[in-house]
Amino acid sequence: MGTTVLRSYRPATPSLTQWIGVGFLAGAASVLVFHQGAIAVMHALELTQRVPYPMQPTEPFGVPQIWSLTFWGGV
């Protein structure tokens, strides 16, 4: 019964593509959690008339405003 040693090389740092993907997801998530969360709190305290998570269509493609905000937050 022999011992098998499995050696695999994993780079110490992620590739550029992984960094960009993680950065995009972090930015998009921060819009949904922190940006819209702050608007929800301010709306609940009647400090603003904006509602959180707006679904009005945007120009020119008619995408809901929350998804537009999320995309641009990721970018």
Image (spheres, helix red, strand yellow):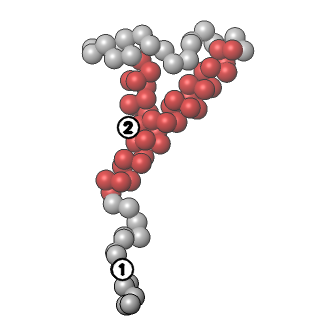
Q: Residues within 10 Å of mark 1 (few under 14, many from 20)?
A: few
Q: Residue at x 58, y 32 (%)?
A: 34
Q: CA distance from mark 1 to mark 2?
A: 39 Å
Three-letter residue code for mark 1: Leu
Q: Position of residue 24 (x, y in %)?
A: 40, 42
Q: Residue furthest front?
A: 1
Three-letter residue code for mark 2: Val
Label drawn at residue 6? 1
Q: Residue furthest right?
A: 45
- Is residue 13 found left or right of 51 in the rendered image? left
Q: Residue at x 45, y 35 (%)?
A: 28
Q: Residue furthest left?
A: 61
Q: Secondary structure at mark 1?
A: loop
Q: Which residue is mark 2?
A: 75
Q: Quadrant where the C terminus lies?
A: top left
Q: Position of residue 62 (x, y in %)?
A: 31, 13
Q: Quadrant where the N terminus lies?
A: bottom left
Label drawn at residue 33? none
Label 1 or label 2, whichever comes before in sequence order: 1
Figure quadrant of residue 50 = top right
- Is residue 21 found left or right of 52 in the rendered image? left
Figure quadrant of residue 72 = top left
Q: Residue at x 52, y 36 (%)?
A: 30
Q: Residue furthest bottom?
A: 2
